[in-house]
Image: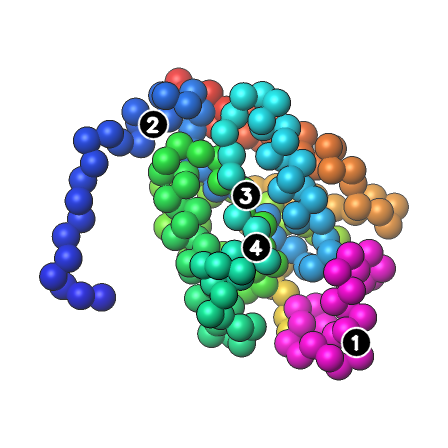
């Protein structure tokens, strides 16, 4: 990084923005295998927050690869950079006072931990979609597991590339009797956590 750059302070800070929105900015980082329900939860959570008058924004891993990260592939170093960029953007959204919902496989623990370290205090909430590979492969909404099993996709998380489960996530959502919980039930669990930790009001 160049040494000839300087941080420009803003006259309106995080405290003022949160007061204006009557909520506290944070990052809800949803991680898990492909097909585990990350995007489903992100959309349901955003809708439920909207009905409560709370402002959120979804950073979806696939969507970001159409723009911000379209120059990145799926090699290990590209995945690291992909998560770093999303972490930096999520940090800005949280600083703006929004509830930023980041939905990415984000398979490597050290990359997720690096994003956590970007945030202040307890404003990084890791949500682990703990769904079995069998369930995710059976759901396979995008047909990617079928392609990976056929050898048409290399380095696919859960098949020939590892997924490192969180060790100390704030929220863990598990399958029940071989099924993914309903979107509303999962969203309510996250909202209950946000309410309990004071993110849905500014006091």
Point out the tag, 3 or 4, that comes first from the N-terminus. Answer: 3
Q: What distance separates the C-alpha of mark 1 from that of mark 3?
A: 30 Å
State which region is magenta.
Answer: 132-160
Q: What distance separates the C-alpha of mark 1 from that of mark 2?
A: 48 Å
Q: Which residue is mark 3?
A: 58
- Nearer the viewer's eye, disc 3 or disc 4? 4
What residue is drawn where x is 78% and y is 64%? 143
Q: Residues within 10 Å of mark 4 (few under 14, many from 20)?
A: few
Q: Which mark is residue 149?
A: 1
Q: Is residue 142 magenta?
A: yes
Q: Quadrant of the N terminus?
A: bottom left
The answer to whether any part of residue 196 appears in the image is no
Q: Which mark is residue 17?
A: 2
Where in the figure is residue 87, as x and y percent of width and height? 43, 53
Where in the figure is residue 156, as x and y percent of width and height? 67, 72
Q: What distance separates the C-alpha of mark 3 from that of mark 2?
A: 19 Å
- Nearer the viewer's eye, disc 2 or disc 4? 4
Specify whether 181 is left or right of 165. right
The reply to whether dot 3 and dot 4 touch (C-beta < 8 Å) is yes
- Disc 1 on helix, strand or loop? helix
- Disc 2 on helix, strand or loop? helix
- Nearer the viewer's eye, disc 4 or disc 1? 4
Specify whether 104 is left or right of 81. right
Depth check: give the residue in front, 160 or 59: 59
Q: What distance separates the C-alpha of mark 2 from that of mark 4?
A: 27 Å
Q: Residues within 10 Å of mark 1 (few under 14, many from 20)?
A: few
């Amino acid at each position: 990084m160049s040494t000839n750059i300087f941080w420009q302070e803003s006259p309106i800070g995080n405290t003022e923005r949160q007061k204006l929105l009557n909520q506290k900015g944070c990052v809800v980082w949803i991680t898990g295998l492909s097909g585990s329900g990350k995007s489903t939860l992100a959309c349901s959570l955003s809708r439920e927050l909207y009905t409560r008058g709370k402002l959120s924004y979804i950073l979806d891993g696939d969507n970001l690869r159409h723009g911000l990260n379209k120059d990145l592939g799926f090699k290990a170093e590209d995945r690291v950079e992909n998560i770093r960029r999303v972490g930096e953007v999520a940090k800005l959204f949280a600083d703006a006072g929004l509830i930023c919902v980041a939905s990415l496989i984000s398979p490597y623990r050290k990359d997720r931990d690096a994003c956590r370290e970007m945030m202040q205090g307890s404003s990084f909430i890791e949500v682990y979609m703990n769904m079995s590979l069998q369930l995710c492969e059976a759901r396979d909404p995008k047909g990617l597991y079928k392609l990976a099993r056929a050898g048409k996709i290399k380095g696919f998380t859960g098949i020939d590339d590892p997924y490192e489960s969180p060790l100390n996530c704030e929220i863990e959502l598990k399958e029940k009797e071989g099924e993914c919980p309903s979107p509303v039930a999962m969203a309510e669990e996250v909202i209950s956590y946000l309410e309990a930790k004071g993110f849905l009001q500014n006091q």
